[in-house]
Image (cartoon, rainbow, N blue to C red):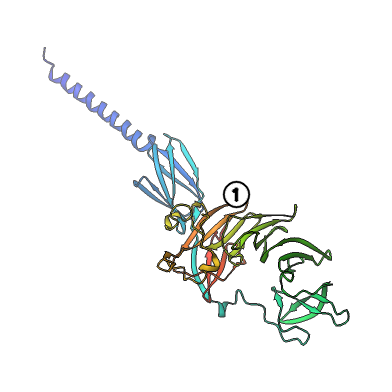
Amino acid sequence: MPLSEQTVKKLSLISLIFLAVTGSFFMLFAFFLNKGTLTVIAHAPYVINIGNIKTEACPTDECSVVMAPGKYEVTLKKAGYRDAVISVDVPIGGEKKAKVDFEFLPTLRLYGDESAMRIFADPVVAPADDLPLTGIFYEKNYLAYIDRDSETHRQTLYVRTINAGQVEEKTIATSFMREIKDYKLVTDIENRGKIALIDATAGASTLYMIDLKAKTRENLLTYPLITDIRWIPGGDDFLFSARDEGDISESLFIFHWADRKASKLNLKTTLANVVPVNASTLIAATLQNLGGDGSGNDLEGHLVTLGENEATPSVMSALVGNAATTFAGNTAPLLKFIEYSLPTDQARLLKIAPDLGYPARAALSETQKSAYFLIDGKDYELQFADEVK
């Protein structure tokens, strides 16, 4: 039996009402209920890119984005930092929080000419009649030297303060019974009240530590050759470069003051190119080979294995360090800046510098977030940590 016209109109009206209600519910669900929130907590400013679907600029540390629920791969970008990629699952009507620490990308820049910057220059002092002509070892506010005492006729280690460019009266640190002819002084009077004396008079090298506060002199170690030491911040441990028995080149060692023991580092460079940052971290310039081919910038920021078949610094220092430079038919190793962990004996590659030669000296900046390297009369600054943190 066919439906009446009035029944058809009623059914049509019911259908329209149903569609309207269904559509309204769908619209309500799609635009209001079918939503979730992704909240990212990171150091602003940064940009959130959600699966190449949506991009949000974040001027504050905590940044929330309302989006459809589901699983996403999110890329966070920040100038001067490595992109961070995270996977998130945003719940319906809920919030997903994600904390992100951006990895700082080290930078290397020309800082200036050493002749103008004088980062590595000795302090300028006014002439003094009682200063020897040679054999003076400087730090910022002090100088030290060995001279013969006019009364005792013994060789004596003197320490003098530098005040506004003037050398003040000398203080006796210690004196010696025997003649010391071949030696080097490494002072840290400012921080530790200590002077290291490397004595090579008798052929082999003996390292003495002179404590100005305790008024002691201690024989710490002897090697066939010791060339330099560098103290590690935060204690009395120090690094030293030496040639051990049977070695044909120098190695780097760490001396642990607590147990008076030395251990060799898996780091091949000159000590002049090593910057101790704290008790666990060194920044260094090296020609040492890396694990793998060791020649790609794609390794920057990653842990690397320091290869045993390193270039001997004394041989390679004459080379430019350019990838096109060859020695005995082999391509010269690239100059690399690394972060070396003393506790783990591992390294992280910070920067490769194919166009720079081998540095002559290195020093930590006052911020302790960058290091200076002296290369061919120019100072280069390696920024290895974020200044704002």
Residue 365 x %, y %: 60, 67
Q: Amino acid at mark 1?
A: Thr
On-image quarter of the C terminus: bottom right
Residue 132 x %, y %: 75, 83
Residue visible at 74% across and 71% down in the picture: 201
Q: Viewed as shown, does residue 3 lie left or right of 259?
A: left
Q: Which class describes the residues within 10 Å of circle 1: few (<14), some (14-19), or many (20+)? A: few
Image height check: is 377 above or below 302? below
| Residue 277 visible in the picture | no
Residue visible at 69% across and 73% down in the picture: 140
Please name whichever residue, 336 or 118, is drawn nearer the observer in this view of the structure.
336
Please name whichever residue, 218 or 367, is drawn nearer the observer in this view of the structure.
218
Image height check: is 321 above or below 85? below
Please name whichever residue, 220 or 376, is drawn nearer the observer in this view of the structure.
220
Residue that carries the numbered disc 1 in the rendered image: 344
Q: Viewed as shown, does residue 388 lie left or right of 298?
A: right
